[in-house]
Image (cartoon, helix red, strand yellow):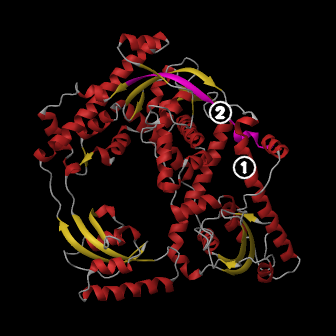
Amino acid sequence: MLHLMRKHAQSWLIKLALGAIVVVFVFWGVGSYRARRGNRIAVVNGTPIVLEEFRGAYDQLLEAYRRQFGDALDEQLIRNLDLKRQALDQLINRTLLFQEATRLNFRVTKEELLRTIGEVPAFQRNGRFHPQVYQRVLTRNRITPETYEESTKNRLLIDKLQSFIFGSIKVSEAEALEIYKWLEEEVSLDYVIFEPSTDDNIKVTAEEIETYFSEHEKSYEVPAKVKVRYLLLDFKGFEAQAKVSEEEVGAYFDLNKEDYATPKRVRARHILFKVERDANPEAIEEARKKAVNVLKQARSGKDFDELARKYSDDTGSRGKGGDLGFFARDRMVRPFSDAAFGMKSGEISEPVRTAFGWHIIKVEAVQEAREPVLEEVADRIRTKISKDTARTLAFDRAEEIYDACYRAGNISDAAETNALKVHETEFFPQNGPVKGIKDARKFAETAFALGEDEVSEPLELSDGYLILQLLAKEPARIPELKEVEEKVRQDLIEAKKDDLAKKDAEAFLKSLKDGVEFRKAATSQKLKAKSTGFFKRSGAIPGMGLERDIQEGAFLLSPSKPMPDGVIKGKQGYYVLRFKARQEADPKEFEDKKSEITSSLLVRKRQEAGEELLARLRKKSEIVIEEGFLD
């Protein structure tokens, strides 16, 4: 069991501390019927996977990671996560599972299919399946009922296969207890940091620059670039053709009335007494007492605005006297909303506990829920229908023009016949901006998937449909040193600074192993020895933040081995660690967490069983990925 935990420590931390990433491909398989157009990116045992499927998988995966990492998800992290490979692997895996389910003769009945579709909230009105809503939702997404139903059937087949595989997997209480002890164990460290020097007078020679470049030339690689020609069918150009009748407006309103209803809203102020997520009971109680003290002042008549400006830890609203404006129930965390929406105008709440800390809430005004009136929203509906219709018209026209381009083998002839302007780009890399293109990522992704002179299927971007033709491709290359010499020089200087910090840290660690007392050694070198306090395998280390390598190394230390074999590199520099204390998990709290841990461990064991199945299927399958697609 422990080998499993160590092997999957990172995924355990994500699942238990941050929540697992779950991606559901609702329209999986929709793109397969278009494979005849030569836009395939992979073939699995004869079954093609096409670019349109990949785009949908990639976008959903990217959105899942955005929810997971927030603003921290930058281009570098996206590259490190290798989302392109992940998305393609998911499509390949689903294809393999579908093929295996078919081989084992699993079946989906008509009743099962209808029940599953009927349970989709997007297809319901007043909690019941509504055929017109179903048709309208599919039409908006340019999916036919036949295609969607086939896709759903395929997904249900995979679900049946997974249920068959996972049905016998269980988690014992002993296994759950072992995981609990592993997760809840805490350690405390002493440490010193050796930060890279800020000295800008470090000298480097021409020979050193040349050597460094030759050893790291791959990191200076000039990426591959492409040049394309494209046509644009702008949505705005079709809006004039999208005539909307009053009957259509009324019918849309009847089917989507709840979308235009005004929910109950509350305007409130609050004073936040912040509590860290991993705070101990004493800190939580101390913050609550502060809240109670300020609450007494508020209820005795002191101005809430002034109290918020003085005491609130919410930097976003403190300068506005704690004013949060009007908000609907779902805009705030549940304990906060439950309190605010249960109060009348002018009332002040008792301290309310949320993940952020303790809140005192004052309700300033209440706006009751209001049913929509057609006359008030008719213009908005008319605009929406017009835009949706324009997109459909543009799509149909793009399909016609694509067929003409495909037959001709180029886009210029079709452009001339249809009076469309041909645009031509400069050479651009896959991760770089493209002049005149708003969604450069999708544009580049499509361009780089094309072969020489190949014409793409219609590509939907925010402003219209585009049809691309690849004109030329420049392969990736290693530049001459003179092209990047200044960058190499700066990188070498930073590397030298880093190396000096590492050597100093290693010398300090050696002195400790030779018997010098930790704090005495730190004092002699004018270093500040610090302590972390207790921390677990998940979450941040006090004073350091998220440092996975340090967390992993810390839990290998003990009184018999108080220091790691080497220094550890972190975000601030090189760390020298010393074990201070260990705190075992409290067995009394196991019952409270048993259910959550059992569920997570069951997910983990099922995931491993699924991975084993996929490994077997991949081993005996023929999988061909188009050359250069993952470059």
Verify CB contact (< 8 Å) between mark 2 and mark 1. Answer: no
Rendered location of residue 409, percent (x, y): 50, 12
- The mark that comes first in sequence, 2 or 1, is 1
Q: Nearer the viewer, residue 56 or 473?
A: 473
Identify the mark at residue 599; answer none if there is no mark: none
Rendered location of residue 495, percent (x, y): 75, 54
The image shows residue 217, relative to residue 472, as above or below, that is below
Q: In this rendering, would 220 be left or right of 82?
A: right
**Label 2 environment density (alpha carbons within 10 Å; few <14, some 14–19, many ≥20):** few
Span colored in magenta = 215-232
Rendered location of residue 80, percent (x, y): 62, 48
Q: Is residue 27 visible?
A: yes
The amino acid on which the numbered mark 1 sits, given as a three-letter code, is Asp
SS class of the residue under badge 1?
A: helix
Question: Quarter-wise, where is residue 137 in the image?
Answer: top left
Q: In this rendering, would 207 be left or right of 18?
A: right
SS class of the residue under badge 2?
A: loop
Q: Nearer the viewer, residue 581 or 314?
A: 314
Q: In this rendering, would 378 be left or right of 11?
A: left
The image shows residue 8, relative to residue 374, as above or below, that is below
The amino acid on which the numbered mark 2 sits, given as a three-letter code, is Ser
Question: Quarter-wise, where is residue 316 in the image?
Answer: bottom left
Identify the mark at residue 491; answer none if there is no mark: 1
Q: Which residue is mark 2?
A: 621
The image shows residue 81, relative to residue 248, as above or below, that is below
Rendered location of residue 375, percent (x, y): 10, 45
Q: Nearer the viewer, residue 275 or 155?
A: 275
The image shows residue 423, relative to residue 606, as above or below, that is above
Q: Nearer the viewer, residue 415 or 255?
A: 415
The residue at the point 27 percent across, 34 percent down is: 387
Q: Is label 2 or label 1 in front?
A: 1
